[in-house]
Image: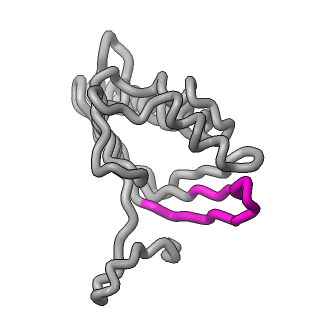
Amino acid sequence: MVATNTKTNEEARIRAVIDTWASAMRAKNADGLVSQYAADNAKFILAPPLQYTKDNPFGKKDLEEWFSSFQGPIDYEHRDLSISTGDDVAFCHSLNRMRATTTKGAKVDLWFRQTLGFRKIDGQWKIAHEHSSVPFYMDGSDKAAVDLKP
């Protein structure tokens, strides 16, 4: 029973990190987002270039600039979240939805896939790896399939 309870507790702690991250996204709180990451994280996110690392981070300034391109808060949700934990490494995957209105009035409603890798650092779960993606149509157009819904 101890192993099951420990795993459940660790999953709850990871879920709390994810919930804090999502709340920071909704509030456009760059500090709140950045604080959830390990210092040496790697990001493979929707924004170019192909990857961000500690030597080329997507950090607070980048987030603030991106947030400023939206009016009001950002609506953000996770669906089908699955968490797997070990002693000091864990990962999760989910389908995520972001809805917002740009400062130019365009409506954004995007579903995308996300995988997060976590490391326990000084007793705290931190995001060490982020991968977000959208599929693309394999019809020769190479267009991102941003119109898909679960």
Percent coordinates x, y for residue 49 in the rendering = 33, 49
Direction bottom: furthest residue: 139
Q: Residue at x 45, y 30 (%)?
A: 59
Magenta span has 124?
no
Q: Residue at x 24, y 30 (%)?
A: 89
Percent coordinates x, y for residue 148 in the rendering = 49, 75
User: Could one spot residue 100 in this view of the protein?
Assistant: yes
- Magenta region, residue range: 98-112
Query: What is the number of callouts on the image?
Result: 0
Percent coordinates x, y for residue 94 in the rendering = 42, 54
Percent coordinates x, y for residue 95 in the rendering = 45, 59
Q: Say left or right for 58 vs 109.
A: left
Q: Residue at x 59, y 56 (%)?
A: 98
Indicate the quadrant where residue 26 lies.
top right
Image height of 73 relative to 87, above or below: below
Q: Residue at x 48, y 22 (%)?
A: 35
Q: Nearer the viewer, residue 104 or 42?
A: 104
Q: Say left or right for 101 vs 10.
A: right
Q: Quadrant of the N terminus?
A: top left
Q: Nearer the viewer, residue 79 or 50?
A: 50
User: Could one spot residue 93 in this view of the protein?
Assistant: no
Q: Main secondary structure of the magenta part?
A: strand
Magenta span has 106?
yes
Q: Say left or right for 117 vs 99.
A: left
Q: Nearer the viewer, residue 93 or 109?
A: 109
